[in-house]
C-alpha cells in the first residue's frame, strides 16, 4: 500500500487533535450534562466510563483499522474490503448519516453562535425571561437560518482548505483553546457558593439509581460522543500516517473526549446548584434557558465575571461544535471528491449547499413549519430519530461484525500493530469484545430505544 499517494495529516499530534475535535462536540458540553442530570448524577458517570472503555474504544479502533488500511473514503473503504458483498451498505449508511446529522447539527450550532453574539453584546445579562428569549429566537423564520448559514460558512472555509492546512491546522489551534477555556470555566465554577453540592452530585454515586434504562442511555451517549459509526473517524483514519499507533490514538481520543464531558459537568452543575430552585434535569433547555438564568443570578454581585463566564462558555460550545461539524462535512466531501473525481472546492461546495438546504427545513421546523410532522415528529426530530436511533446503532453493530467476523484476523492484527512492529497485548481481549460483547450490547440499546 502506498501511503504517500494521498494527502494526509502531517503529524501524529495533528491526527489525535483532529479526531478528538470530531469527538468533542455538542454531545460533550450540551448532551452529556443533560443525560447526567436526567439519570441521577455520579451513578450514570460510573456506567458511562465503563461503556467508553469496554465498547467505545474497541469500536473506535475498528473504524481506524478500516480507514487506515484502505486509505479511502468510507463508501469505497467497505467496497474495497468486501467487493460485491452487502457489507458495502454500511459505507453508504455511514456517509448518508453524516450528511443527515450535519444538516441538523448546524441548526444547534447556529443557536450557539447566536448565544455567543448575544452574550458578547451583554444581552444575556439583562435579567430577561430566558425561556421566551429562546423560544422567540428559534421560532423566528430567518434569524436562526442566518446563524446556521454563518456557521456552515465557517465549516466550509476550513474544509475547502484541505486536510493539512484546513482540518489539521484548525484543530491544532481550536483544541488547545477549547481545553484552556474549560480550565478557566472549571475554576470559576468551583468558586461559586453552593458548588460543593454540585460536586457531590457528580462524585458520590447512588447505585440504587442504576437501572436498565440508565445503562442503555450511557451506551447511546458513548457512541454519539465518540463519533462512532458515522464514517468520520474512518475518513480521518485514512489520513493517518503509517506509523500512527491505532490503539494508542483511540485511547488518547477517548480520554480527551471523556475528560471534556466530565469537566463540562464540573462547569455546569456547581453553577446550577448554586442557584436555588433551578432543576438539574431541565433537559435540552439546560444550556440555552437554565444556564443564562443561572449565570445571571450566580454572578449578580460581580456582573463582569458573569459576562466573561457566559461568553467563554458559548465560545466553548461553538468551538466544540465546529470541530465536530468539520469531521461530518469531511466524511461526505471525501466521498464526493474521490467518487466523482472533482476538485475539493467543488465537492465541499456541493456538500455545504445541499446540507444547508436541508438545514433550513430543520430550522424552520421550530417555527413556521412546526405543524409539518410525521409520526408525531417535526423535521428536525425526524432527522435526529432516523440518524441516531436507527442508522447509528445498526451501523455500530455492522462495524463490529465486519471487523470481528468478516475481515481476516491477521489483517486486523497487522493494522493494529503496524505490521507487527508494535506490541498490542490486549489484542485477544479486543477481538473478543468486537465479536461478541459490543454487538450484543449495542443490539440491546437499539431494541430498548425502539420500544421506549
Ligand atoms: N461526537 C460529537 C459530539 O459529541 C457528535 C458527532 C457525531 C460529531 C458524529 C461527528 C460525528 O457532539
Image: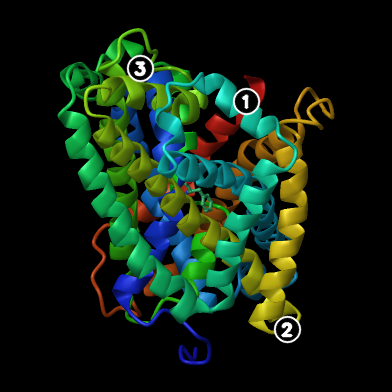
Where does the image place residue 6, in percent across and percent down from the top left? Answer: 53, 87
- Helix, strand or loop for disc 2: loop
Labels 3 and 1: the sequence-earlier one = 3
Residue located 30% across and 78% down the image: 420
Residue to which mark 2 is pinned: 342
Residue located 44% across and 68% down the image: 412
Label 3, label 1: how far apart the Cα atoms are: 28 Å
Q: Quadrant of residue 381?
A: top right
Instruction: Please state which of residues 103 and 441 is positioned toward the viewer in this rendering.
Output: 103
Residue located 34% across and 57% down the image: 253
Residue to which mark 1 is pinned: 135
- Helix, strand or loop for disc 3: loop
Where does the image place residue 304, in percent across and percent down from the top left? Answer: 26, 36
Name the side, left or right, on which 227 lies relative to 261.
right
Q: Quadrant of the C terminus?
A: top right
Residue to which mark 3 is pinned: 40
Instruction: Please state which of residues 272 and 95 is positioned toward the viewer in this rendering.
Output: 272
Labels 2 and 3: the sequence-earlier one = 3
Instruction: Please state which of residues 319 and 115 is positioned toward the viewer in this rendering.
Output: 115
Residue 223 shows in the view = no
Labels 1 and 2: the sequence-earlier one = 1
Residue 186 shows in the view = yes
Vertical placement of residue 24 versus 298, above or below: below
Amino acid at each position: 500500500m502506498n501511503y504517500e499517494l494521498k494527502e494526509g495529516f502531517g503529524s501524529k499530534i495533528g491526527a489525535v487533535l483532529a479526531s478528538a475535535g470530531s469527538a468533542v462536540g455538542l454531545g460533550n458540553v450540551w448532551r452529556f450534562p443533560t443525560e447526567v442530570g436526567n439519570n441521577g448524577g455520579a451513578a450514570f458517570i460510573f456506567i458511562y466510563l465503563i461503556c467508553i472503555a469496554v465498547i467505545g474504544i474497541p469500536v473506535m479502533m475498528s473504524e481506524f483499522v478500516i480507514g487506515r488500511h484502505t486509505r479511502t473514503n468510507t463508501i469505497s473503504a467497505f467496497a474495497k474490503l468486501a467487493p460485491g458483498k452487502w457489507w458495502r451498505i454500511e459505507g453508504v449508511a455511514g456517509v448518508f448519516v453524516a450528511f443527515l446529522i450535519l444538516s441538523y447539527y448546524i441548526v444547534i450550532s447556529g443557536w450557539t453562535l447566536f448565544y455567543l453574539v448575544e452574550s458578547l453584546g451583554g444581552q444575556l445579562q439583562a435579567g430577561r425571561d430566558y425561556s421566551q428569549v429562546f423560544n422567540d429566537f428559534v421560532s423566528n423564520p430567518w434569524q436562526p437560518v442566518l446563524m446556521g448559514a454563518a456557521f456552515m460558512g465557517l465549516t466550509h472555509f476550513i474544509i475547502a482548505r484541505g486536510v493539512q492546512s484546513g482540518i489539521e491546522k484548525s484543530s491544532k489551534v481550536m483544541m488547545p483553546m477549547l481545553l484552556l477555556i474549560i480550565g478557566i470555566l472549571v475554576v470559576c465554577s468551583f468558586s461559586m457558593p453552593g458548588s460543593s453540592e454540585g460536586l457531590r452530585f457528580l462524585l458520590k454515586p447512588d447505585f440504587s439509581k442504576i437501572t436498565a434504562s440508565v445503562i442503555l442511555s450511557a451506551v447511546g451517549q458513548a457512541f454519539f460522543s465518540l463519533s462512532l459509526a458515522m464514517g468520520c473517524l474512518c475518513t480521518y483514519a485514512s489520513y493517518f500516517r503509517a506509523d500512527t499507533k491505532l490503539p494508542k490514538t483511540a485511547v488518547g481520543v477517548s480520554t480527551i473526549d471523556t475528560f471534556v464531558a466530565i469537566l463540562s459537568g464540573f462547569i455546569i452543575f456547581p453553577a446550577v446548584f448554586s442557584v436555588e430552585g433551578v432543576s438539574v434535569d431541565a433537559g435540552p433547555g439546560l444550556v440555552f434557558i437554565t444556564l443564562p438564568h443561572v449565570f445571571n443570578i450566580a454572578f449578580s454581585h460581580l456582573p463582569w465575571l458573569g459576562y466573561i463566564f457566559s461568553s467563554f462558555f458559548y465560545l466553548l460550545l461553538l468551538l466544540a461544535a465546529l470541530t465536530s461539524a468539520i469531521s461530518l462535512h469531511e466524511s461526505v466531501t471525501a466521498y464526493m471528491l474521490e467518487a466523482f473525481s472533482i476538485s475539493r472546492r467543488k465537492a465541499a461546495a456541493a456538500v455545504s449547499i445541499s446540507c444547508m438546504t436541508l438545514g433550513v427545513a430543520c430550522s424552520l421546523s421550530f417555527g413556521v413549519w412546526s405543524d409539518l410532522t410525521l409520526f408525531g415528529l417535526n423535521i428536525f426530530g425526524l432527522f435526529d430519530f432516523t440518524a441516531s436511533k436507527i442508522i447509528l446503532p445498526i451501523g455500530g453493530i455492522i462495524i463490529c461484525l465486519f471487523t470481528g467476523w468478516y475481515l481476516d484476523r491477521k489483517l486486523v492484527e497487522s493494522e493494529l500493530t503496524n505490521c507487527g512492529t508494535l506490541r498490542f497485548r490486549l489484542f485477544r481481549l479486543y477481538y473478543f469484545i468486537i465479536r461478541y460483547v459490543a454487538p450484543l450490547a449495542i443490539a440491546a440499546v437499539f431494541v430498548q430505544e425502539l420500544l421506549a
